[in-house]
Structures are given as structure tokens and as C-alpha cells.
Image (cartoon, rainbow, N blue to C red):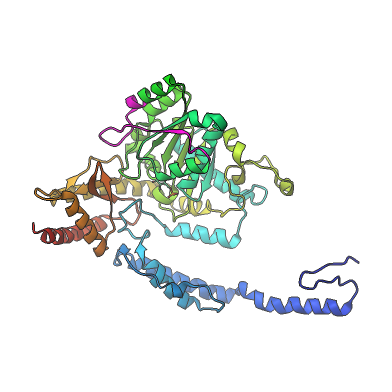
Amino acid sequence: MRHYSLTGYGVSLGNNQKLMKDLIDRIIALESISKELEPTEKERDRLNQEVQAYANTFIKALKTKPAYTKGEVNSDALKIDSHQHSLTTLLEHYSSEVADQGIKPASGGHLGYIPGGGIYTAALGDFLAAFTNEYAGMYYGSPGAVTIENELLDWMKGVFGFPKNAIGNLTSGGSIANLIALTAARDAYGVKNEKITKSVIYMSPQVHHCIHKAIRIIGMEDVQIRLLTLDALSKIDSEKLKETIAHDLENGLRPFMIIASAGTTDTGAVDPLEEIGAIAKQHHLWYHIDGAYGGFFILDEEKKELFKGIEMADSLVVDPHKSLFIPYGLGAVLIKDKEAVFQSHHYTANYMQDAVTNMQINPADVSPELTKHFRGLRLWLPLKLHGVQPFVACLKEKLLLTTYFRSQLEMIGFELGPTPDLSVSYFWYPVLEGDENAFNEKLMELIHQDGRIFLSSTKIDGKFVIRMAILSFRTKITTIDSAIVMIKTCLSAAKSHFGI
Ligand SMILES: *Cc1c(COP(=O)(O)O)cnc(C)c1O
């Protein structure tokens, strides 16, 4: 008989009957406590019903509750202690301390930053993924889950004109997706050692800050970064880009990557993707496009032209948790050069020897993650249930609502930023005498105090402007009408504050 040495026992049991009985008794005693973690079917029904009821109350209230509440969280209610609490109490705490505080990404009234989504059927996908707990890191572990994720990536390759043999990954969001893409670029061009300080990356000053973070994380902070000149519509000026590259070449530098945006965060500008693609090709540069906000607007036939050239990218990032209305936690990256990605992410270890299979690309070979959430299901389920068409209609609706909002604002005397490429735009109230920035800052403050509709602000060439980003699937024409009512009220208050 084998002798087991047991932690907590510290002895080998051997044939000692008494110790064996003692051991079994202890295991059984613990089981009666740990079985709490497996609620019975009846308990599950009760728990599900409570959450279901909360979901219904929550969604119903979204129309009337403010999109923004600046509040204080009672963290005592959220502290971990050793007691058990009823789900009823916990849902009350969730509602008051979490769901009712701050910006509400689930609300159609969220028109700030880049709004979130949170379609219900995606939450059901998460629920399924969680209780089946499929291992989505390796094909060997869950061939079905990995196939679903790869099917989604194949669908995206089709949407963006990427070749079938490109690879990709479903990430937690756009930041990690950009990190994976930039790492591949680094490895494809061997940017290391003495090459680092001579290598040049070209990008718009409007690129999302996660690009700068990624550059630091992957040890490229000492590359030369050229923040390019923009045209009047905040897009990369491709003539100036050519000149900058020529200048760097003359100076013995090593141009290596161009980063363009398919929808900047600040103004939603889509860079001239095709022109930049041609320049990248001519100079053999890695071409990266960040479409985290805007990428999926390509699904609108009327916007296709704007995205021409996106298929020329070596790597592309999109964010289904933005422009496909999925709850937070889903980005995607597509990359043409598989070897470059494998250089940093493909790994074999002895303890993984059973998992080697060439059937499909393993998510773990394309990302720093090994064990991962089966996040593909939250997109796959809604796409299969609803079909793609409602998503496309929703994107088109957002574009038209942007036009509608802008013309309503114009009618009440606001100045508008240029006609936007997509659904991000900005406006400000002109003040003939006095400090226009101060007036608009005050107006923004009043809008935040009101909170019915949430808008954010930015600075365009030193000018304080209020920004609108229409991307929530719950933003409807009635939302825009409410926004106008709210803005009118706040405008009057700002005017009386300044005595105008
Ligand atoms: C939101 C955004 C990102 C960052 O994506 P996360 O999903 O927030 O990590 C990157 N680029 C652009 C253009 C974005 O709008």
C-alpha cells in the first residue's frame, strides 16, 4: 500500500485504521460546509429569479434615472467580512453603491467619452460561459470554445478585408489588443538593442494614450516618436508624413511603424487610411490601425469608402465593447504576420505537452493570457441570436442621431465642430463679450450637476468644447430630445450666472 503524506496530518497513514477513519471523518465534516458552494436546483432558481427581477427593475429604470451621479460610495457596505449575507441585501447594496453611482454606461443617456453598451443577450453569453467554465485558452481544452472564438475572428477578417490566414485574438479590450499588435510589430522588425534609438514610429498626436502605454510596456520608450501634423479635420496629413519619413531616412534613422486611427477618441476622425497604407507599403513599414472606437462603422455601406485601405494594415484593433454594444471586456486584434506574434506569445512547456495540437490557433499562442475567460460567447450568442443586421441598423441610427443632435444644437445657438466622420462631435456656446472658455466650462459643470444626460468635454486647439459621443445602443431620438431640454435649462442658468 502507498503511504500518503498529508498536509495538516503530517504523518503517513499506512495501515493505521484509526487515522484513516479520522481522516475520512474530517473530509466529510468539511464537505458539509463546502457544499454551500453548490446551491441546489431550488436555490439556484431562487437566486436566478432575484437577479432576473433586479435586471428587469434596473433596465426599466434606465429611462428615468440620470446618466451620471456624482456621489459617495459607502464602502463599508462593500467590505469583505466573514459573514454570510442574503442576495436581497447584496443586490440592494449593489444598486445603491454601484449601479446608482458615477457614469452609467448601460444608460442611453451616456454620451460622454466613448459610451459602453451592455446588450442583454451578451450577459446571457457570459452566464453560460461562467457556469460551464469552458477553458478557452487551448483547443485541446475546449475545441468548441476555441472554434467559436476563431469563427468570430474569421468573421472580423471578412468584415475588414483581412486574409483568412491572418491571426487574431479576442482580448479584454482595445488597450491589450493594441499591446499585442505593437509587440508583433516590434518583433517583426527586430526592434531591440542598438536599433531601438534609431527606429521611428509615426502617429497622430490624437492616438489613444494606450498606444503610448504599450510602447513603454514593451520596452520601446526610447524609439523616436513622430507626432504628425494634422489637417483641419484632425486627420494625419499624408504629404507631411512623406516629408517626415524622407527627412528621417536622410538622417540615417530607421522608420519602422505608422499608426493610424479609424476613429480617434477625441473627434472620431478617420485618418486617410488608403494614402497612409500606400506610404507604409512604399517604405516597408509596419502599418497599424486602431479602430477601437470606429472600426465597426465599416458595416454601414454608406461609410465603407471612409475605411478604404483598412485592409492594407498589418495589424488592426477593434473593440466590440464599444461599437458592437457588448458589455465591457471585449476587444479584438487581427494581425497578418503570424510568426511575429508567435515570437513573443507562442510557448511550449513540459506540463503543456498534452495540449499540442495543430487543429486551430490557440488563443494562448496569440496573447499573454493562458487561462482566460471564454469571452467570445458574449459576442457569438448575440450575433447568432439577433443576426448582424440589427447591429448595422443600430450603428446607422447612431450616425443619424449625431446629425440630428447637431442640427438641434445649432438651432439653439451653439457653434459646432466640423461635420464628423462618425458619431463623435463637439460644440460650444459662442460668447460675444467675455471669456468663452469660462462660459463653456461653467455650462459643462451645470450639465454634470444635472446629470440626466452625460456629456464630457475636451480641448480643441486650446478651445474648451463640449463633446458628444453617440454610441450606446440605448441612445434613441427621445434621448437626444431630453439632452436638448437639459442643455437649454443649463444654458439659461449659465447665462444668468454670467449676467448675459
Ligand atoms: C477606447 C479606445 C482604446 C482603448 O480601448 P480599451 O477597450 O478602453 O482598453 C484604444 N483606442 C481607441 C481609439 C479607443 O477609443
Tell me: 67 left or right of 252: left
Relative height, residue 278 to residue 216 (above, below): above
Residue numbers of the magenta segment: 219-241
Magenta segment, prevailing SS (helix, strand or loop): loop
* 239 part of magenta stretch: yes
Residue at 43 percent of width and 60 percent of height? 120
Q: Is residue 114 visible?
A: yes
Q: Give whichever of 244, 251 is nearer the camera.
A: 251
Q: Give whichever of 255, 47 is nearer the camera.
A: 255
Q: Give whichever of 72, 84 is nearer the camera.
A: 72
Relative height, residue 278 to residue 204 (above, below): above
Q: Residue furthest top?
A: 250
* 304 part of magenta stretch: no
Residue at 23 percent of width and 40 percent of height? 419
Q: Splitting the image into 4 quarters, where does residue 347 fall? A: top right
Point out residue 161 in the picture as x, y percentages from the top left corner.
46, 33
Tell me the quadrant of the picture where the C terminus can be found.
bottom left
Tell me the quadrant of the picture where the N terminus can be found.
bottom right
Relative height, residue 311 to residue 413 (above, below): above
Point out residue 413 in the picture as x, y percentages from the top left corner.
13, 50
Point out residue 209 in the picture as x, y percentages from the top left corner.
40, 44
Q: Splitting the image into 4 quarters, where does residue 232 fall? A: top left
Q: Is residue 400 visible?
A: no
Q: Give whichever of 257, 123 is nearer the camera.
A: 257
Residue at 33 percent of width and 57 percent of height? 474
Tell me: 34 left or right of 18: left
